Image (cartoon, rainbow, N blue to C red):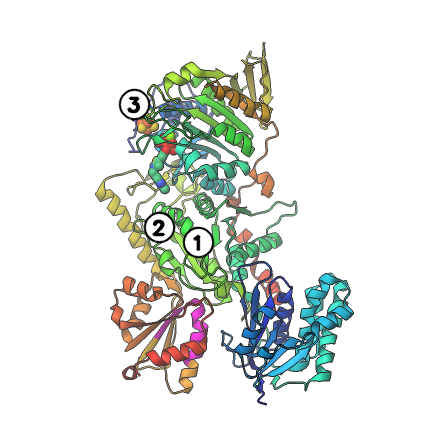
Amino acid sequence: MKQIEATNEFVIRFANINGTGSASANGMLAKSFFKLGLPIGPKNIFPSNIQGLPTWYEVRVSEAGYTGRRGGSDVTVAMNPQTFKQDVEHLHPGGYLVYDSTKRLNEDHKRNDINYIGVPISEMARDHFLNAKSREMLKNVIYVGALAALFDIELEVFYGLVREQFPTKPKLHDGNFKALDLGYNYTKEHYPCPCGIKVSKRELVTSKIILNGNEALGLGAVYAGATVVGWYPLTPSTSVIESFSKYCNKFRKSKDGAQHYAIIQAEDEIAAAGMVVGASWNGARAFTATSGPGISLMSEFIGYAYYAEIPMVLFNIQRCGPSTGMPTRTQQSDLLLCAYASHGDTKHIMLFPSSVKECFEFSVRAFDLADRYQTPVFVMSDLELGMNDYVSAPLQWDESYQHDRGKVLNHETLDSMKDKFYRYLDIDDDGVPYRTYPGIHPSGAYFTRGSGHDKFGRYTEDGGLYQENMERISKKFHTAINHLPKPRKIIRDDSFGVGIVSIGTTSEPLHEAAEILKTRGVQVNEMLIVSFPFGDEVREFCENHQQVIVIDQNRDAQLKTLLVNELGLNPESLDSICSYDGNPVMASFLVESLSKKIKENAL
Amino acid sequence: MSYIPKPKVSHPGLAKNKLGLTIRDYEGGLSTLCAGCGHDSITAAIIKSCFELSIEPHRVGKMSGIGCSSKTPGYFLSSAHGFNSVHGRMPSVTTGANAANRNLTYLAVSGDGDTASIGIGQFAHVIRRKLNMLYIVENNGCYGLTKGQFSATADVGSKSKRGVANEMDPIDPAAFALQMGAGFVARSFSGDKDQLVPLIKAGLNYNGFALIDVISPCVTFNNHEGSTKSYAHVRSHEAEVNVVDFIPARNEIAVDYAKGDATQVTLHDGSTMMLRKLDQNYDPENRLEALKQIQTHQMKNEVITGLLFLDPKESEMHDMISTPKKSLREFELAELCPGKEALEALNKSWG
Ligand SMILES: Cc1ncc(C[n+]2csc(CCOP(=O)(O)OP(=O)(O)O)c2C)c(N)n1
Ligand code: SF4
Ligand SMILES: [Mg+2]
């Protein structure tokens, strides 16, 4: 029978039931590949549920460095009877199915083009582990032992990971070691080991780190000097706050126990947004983290902050909408919502991180931009980036970096100013007014309002004065473009035939797809947009190519719509590909759909 | 809320407070509310209170939501920072502001619609958080700004201007605040400055959440016969439980209130409140009693006023979240940033 043969290029998939403790065992296997010097791309595919529903975890191992979702599976560990049939069918021909052979295999679970590795996991667990609770957990470790045998990974690697995982609980070590041994020995005895898929030590990830996007965002906020958080729990954004909390706890506690931060769990997202606005108005750096449903609720305050010109940082970890949608699945479908959030004429700065490193950097940058432009700034991540681990270059901090608080008049300046302070004057002709923090100085006081106001900050219902102020805010928005991170381009074809535009997590599979197309003789250029409003580089890229294809992770081609709307492009001049089933975009999907879209005459 | 600056006429004869300021320095723009609106009387009481307390105007955050009542911060303390937020959401903005800078005085004005209808959720939670602020509800039983619809504080049977009677049970902001755990709860009437000023002063000095529910008739939409929030109704149905006088810590003048039925309460900063009881059974440190009194008087169609409850154990949000005495916004960002070495150590832990 055919056996998949591969070294360091494969996908392993785990099918589990959530709430059974599989995550840490599966994570241990992923980590072992990393420890052996290999790039990995783990992906969690989990239900909106705490216990009892199917959950999958995939790890792509790629010596070539492609860690986006590939699709298909070469090795599947099928531990969930509910999805067993589906998992059997999903496996590539020649693939390996590891399953619990305590019970006999069902007839309709048999395929004759895959390799069955039956390990009596339940039976061994029952015979060796008396404690019912730890028995369940250790079943997962038994299959990790079996995989170690199949992939020919020394058990010592896993022993080390167990010690790392429970540094303070040596009691737990023995059970885990035993479980590893059981799975390993049984598999060695009963099956040819290693199997066709091998893991061979490399040094491709030396000095690299493994981290998820949300953790990097939360840490970025600590580095930015944020002190106030208003938030309301919402998957997949909650772990941003958990990260901020964890690192504040580590870095922001004084010896006397005082906490130099305030994390306030609000009663809802409306209140969370109000807290951010109030704290920023009062001179603290403040933020919230949420997802689509939260943005919908926060909209009134977002418009307020836009019009009254109050800094506000919002991390939007996008998930699959509309409404509650599929809350544990990924999408980039809040682009239009956030670009124009709230009623009236509003427009907002957005940053689109596409990697863990950018999550950290954009998190810090978002606070500088919000302060400098006195406006809401969205960091638009998504569930895929936020809740999965990525191999990344180490995060960096430049000691000479100066936080930018923007145009704030301090006590001394106010004291020596000849002219009276007015809040919304365009002193520097860049649309950006000066502000003061409350309580600093008697002459710094002004009245903050969401109702119509003139450049002096005074209430007005005079159309001309209202409009003058609105025009200045628009000018400010355009000034901001110069300070936003620039798009990144990969030019393979300097005759500018086909240009492909993406944001965020789309870029990784797109890059892989473009490289695959290149091996087939199709050269395409890529542009990764990292911020909104779009600058000239974006317009030029779109205008210079014979054919432009925009990749969207939503049904309605929202990125394309934004490009058309903001740059005045002809909608006919942009082709679009939408992948929005809630799963990370796959390179194989892009290769196929791009091949269909690319026009002969554009090449 | 048009900004009509009042001419600043200097009156050499005007009394000065400890800061050398006159009452004029505590005024704001000219009110654009209807003549006779109860809210304007409350504004006057706020001005008097802040003047007498010698509060530095620019150290006050004037917070409000949306409504006629919420416009009033424009009419007092023109050199304080004002924040006219969105409808029903003033509490969250004040929470954030206070989290950032605990060392300002937060004086908030809201309406009954702003508080008990659209804002009931935020009202409940700001109390639970024990935010250190004075929250004044200017309660007229209707939505003034949108032309007189019933609010959630309208009493059963209370008639609108069009003659329609409200049939839904009212929310009593004072009783609600007591249940949510407020540390300071009072009720007053906009027409009773003698009662209102000491309550505002005490509320401003209270270290925790202080609520004053002020019945404040809307002369345009809700001051007719049949409205329980009208001047006539309140004047004839008011039941005072105590007469309050507030003596700031700095004020050494002995007041001769201690006679008769007076009790004295000392606040955290050393200032004292003298309470002359009108009702012998009334104990202002008993939450249950306060709730009972409110209910009992309500059943008799009476409005109970005075200091209803005061928790002498003053505590506030910052005690719960262990923030330092220095305001968070006073920390330099560089001081808050863990720096390069810490990041390198973290990188190692992720390898
Ligand atoms: C989101 C929203 N919905 C509705 C309104 C319209 N609105 C403005 S003021 C108000 C009611 C104000 O009533 P209250 O708080 O009692 O203040 P009053 O005018 O009676 O002093 C309403 C419904 C609004 N401003 N915002
Ligand atoms: S409408 Fe009523 S509440 Fe509003 S200003 Fe006039 S009297 Fe006052
Ligand atoms: Mg009202």
Residue farthest to the left, as pictured = A464
Position of residue A415 measured from the top left corner of the image (x, y, whole percent): 40, 39
Choose mark 3 or mark 1, whichever is in front.
Answer: 1
Residue behind mark 1: A293
Q: Report whether A72 appears left or right of B215.
A: right
Going 62% across and 49% down the picture, which residue do you hit?
A: A253
The residue identified by callout 3 is B35
Horizontal side of A516 relative to A189 (left or right) equals left
Q: Are marks 3 and 2 in contact (CB under 8 Å)?
A: no
* Whether residue A523 is visible: yes
Q: Position of residue A164 (x, y in %)?
A: 69, 67
Q: Residues within 10 Å of mark 1 (few under 14, many from 20)?
A: some
Which residue is outermost to the top?
A: B260
- Crowd tier of the residue under label 2, counting other residues whose Cα lies within 10 Å: few below 14, some 14–19, many 20 or above: many
Circle 3 residues within 10 Å: few <14, some 14–19, many ≥20: few
Quadrant containing the N terminus of chain A is: bottom right
CB-based contact (under 8 Å), mark 2 and mark 1: no
* 3 and 2 marks on the same chain: no
Front residue (pair A444, A269)? A269
Residue A503 lies within the magenta run: yes
On the image, the x and y values in percent for residue B309 come to: 55, 25
Q: Pointer 1 indicates a residue of which chain?
A: A
Q: Chain of mark 2?
A: A
**Which residue carries the number 2 mark?**
A342
**Residue interval drawn in magenta:** A500-514
Q: Residue at x 50, y 57 (%)?
A: A237
Q: Earlier in the sequence, mark 2 or mark 1?
A: 1
Q: Amino acid at mark 1?
A: Pro
